[in-house]
Amino acid sequence: MSMLGSGVIYTETVVHSPPEQFVDDAPYQIAIVRLDSGGRVTARIAGAHVAIGDRVDFLEHRNQIPFFQKTS
Amino acid sequence: MRPVAVIGAGKTPFGAFADRDLRSLTTEAIGKCLKEANVSPGQIEAFFLGNFAGPSFVGQNHLAPYVASAAGICGVPCTRFEAACASSGSAFFHAFSSVAAGLYDIALITGVEKMTSQPTPKVTEILASAGDLTGEVRAGATFPALFAMIARRHMHQFGTTREHLASVAVKNHANGALNPDAHLKKVITLEQALAGKPVADPLTLFDCSLISDGAAAVVLAPLERAAEFTGKPVRVLGIAQTSDRVALDEKDDITTFPAVARAAAKAYRMAGVGPSDIEFAELHDCFTIAEIIASEDLGFCKKGEGGPYCKQGHTSLGGARPVNTSGGLKAKGHPVGATGVAQICDIVMQIRGEAGRRQVAKRSLGLAQNLGGSGATCVVTILGAAA
């Protein structure tokens, strides 16, 4: 784990109609993660899609965007 | 503070108008508005413009004197207000405050947006700039995505369904089909709404408001002078503008808009009425879930029951409290900077009994709710017939 650690999905969506700079990424999932350390962050989800209540772990920052993935 | 009345209102049709620019739109809306009020451009003492992103959509800045002078208004204070989709609601609030305080007698408010000259991904990017660029927007959140996350949470906590969301779109499209100035005059079925192209799950194209061009204008005067201009003044009984955090992830509970509840409480108190007194309303349905949550935050129904409240027909044209008889942002269209003033125009039209095939039966007290971003600005206005 790193600075953002782990957390729980508070809400999520899969974006099909992206803004101009993310046209090549779509469809992609974003979520608000409730961090175990307190606070919330809007993040991208890597790998399998997640749902409200799922546990996730911080993966890495890519271009300053925090990526999380479902806890295995 | 002295009583204030709307003495004239005018708007352009909403739609995609390739051959029209900002000044062509505002000049038409202002011309209609001033003609109705028998006010000449030279009588305007201050000009309040609501516009979200003219500089981004069409590259033009310094917009207030730019559009005012084209309509013959020159020399008086001309100021642009920007509060995302609540830009012209905010302009209206500040114009009202100035007239109520006695600073000016005749104040003109105009809202305008020219959006369709840009392709959809660019429009999506410009709209997203009303969110937090250092967090949610950087991660790829669009406005449909923010409201999709709100919808997901509302569904999770209250059992709101896709059918509830779709019922808002079906109702507003039915109303829009009766509005000659609406962007889309097309009735849709629940099945069509449910089968829409996905935009941000669970929202489809039919859950999202339109990308439109358009302008709207209203002129205010002290109530004591209203009879000089019109036989049908409409009084501003209550109004409030409130704020909240911009980023969705900074809010404790995203299934409610605290700015809406706060603005409503203040406006109700000022008007001396409660939610049950409101006979009809124009609510900010930028997305179907937004109308559902607004109806809850305004006290039209209980928390969590906004979905069934709409689906059961209470907000339909023939229902107990019609909502968005104009077609709403969903069908009338959503030129974002024009929307707040356009809502006021639609309430005024209903109160005067001039709404044609979409006229409501009870028309003495109407409410407009204009939301900026994912709830960081809200303006609630209560209008009534001037006795």
Image (cartoon, coloured by chain):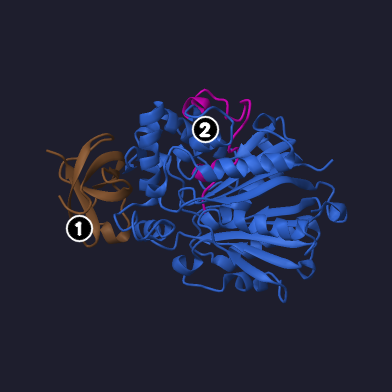
Tell me the mark number nearer the camera, choosing from 1 and 2: 1
Write down the residue under mark 1. A61
Q: Which amino acid does label 2 sit on?
A: Lys
**In this figure, what is the number of numbered marks?**
2
Indicate the colour of chain A: brown
Chain to which mark 1 belongs: A
Q: Where is residue B116 in the image (x, y as percent from the top left)?
A: 45, 59
Q: Where is residue B181 in the image (x, y as percent from the top left)?
A: 59, 48
Tag 1–tag 2 contact (CB < 8 Å): no
Q: Quadrant of the C terminus of chain B?
A: top right
Q: Residues within 10 Å of mark 2 (few under 14, many from 20)?
A: many
Q: Where is residue A39 in the image (x, y as percent from the top left)?
A: 33, 47
Most prominent secondary structure in the magenta stretch?
loop
Chain letter for blue? B
Q: What's the CA distance linking mark 1 and mark 2?
A: 43 Å
Viewer can see residue B191: no
Pick the residue in front: B223 or B297. B297
What segment carries the magenta color?
B307-335
Q: Residue A51 carries which label?
A: none
Write down the residue under mark 2. B171
Q: Is residue B312 above or below residue B129?
A: above
Residue B114 lies left or right of residue B140; in this view the side is right
Residue B284 lies left or right of residue A11; in this view the side is right
Q: What element carries label 2?
A: helix
Q: Quadrant of residue B386?
A: top right
Q: What residue type is labelled 1?
A: His
Pick the residue in front: B10 or B19. B10
Q: In which quarter of the image is residue B313?
A: top right
Q: Residue at x 61, y 30 (%)?
A: B317
Chain to which mark 2 belongs: B
Residue B325 drawn in magenta = yes
